[in-house]
Image: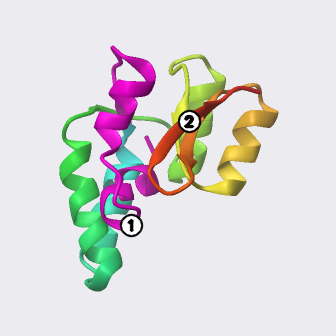
């Protein structure tokens, strides 16, 4: 899961884990440590984005933390996905989504206002 996926509850009013349960049934969730750090930094910024990031950081505690060699969150997610360590990436970030799909990685993203879908390459 990336930072914007974890911020969806505030930014899009979506219950992301409920939607993942509906879409996937049983699943294991991982979050790269770089995503956790990004959320914590954003949470300190205040405002609506800060509130969304604080909620995201709290939700990230439901996921297994993963260390990667990458220092940039999108690169960490890409690396985990392209090496087969995860089956899909949850993101609403359009450039990352395109990059992942081009690499043959399924992406779970927001469709419409309140529903997640899985897009396969």
According to the picture, the residue beneath numbered tag 2 turns out to be 117
Q: Is residue 26 above or below residue 39?
A: above
Q: The magenta stretch spans which residues?
A: 1-30
Q: Position of residue 69 (x, y in %)?
A: 50, 38
On residue 97, the disc is: none
Q: Is residue 94 left or right of residue 28?
A: right
Was residue 22 drawn as part of the magenta stretch in this picture?
yes
Q: Residue at x 34, y 60 (%)?
A: 13
User: Sequence order check: which comes first, mark 1 or mark 2?
Assistant: 1
Judged from this view, the residue extending furthest toward the bottom is 47
Percent across and percent down for residue 30 are 36, 30
Q: Is residue 28 above or below residue 9?
A: above
Residue 47 position in % (x across, y down): 28, 85
Asked if residue 27 is among those painted magenta in the image, a careful observer would answer yes
Local secondary structure at mark 1: helix
Is 9 in front, or is 78?
Answer: 9
């Amino acid at each position: 899961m990336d930072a914007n996926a974890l911020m969806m509850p505030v930014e899009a009013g979506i219950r992301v884990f409920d939607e993942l349960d509906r879409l996937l049934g049983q699943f294991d969730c991982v979050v790269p440590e770089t995503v956790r750090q990004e959320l914590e930094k954003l949470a300190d910024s205040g405002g609506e984005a800060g509130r969304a990031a604080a909620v995201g950081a709290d939700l990230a505690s439901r996921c297994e933390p993963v260390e990667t060699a990458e220092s940039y969150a999108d690169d960490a997610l890409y690396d985990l996905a392209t090496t087969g360590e995860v089956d899909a990436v949850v993101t609403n970030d359009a450039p990352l989504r395109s990059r992942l799909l081009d690499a043959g990685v399924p992406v779970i993203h927001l469709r419409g206002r309140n529903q997640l879908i899985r897009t396969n390459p």
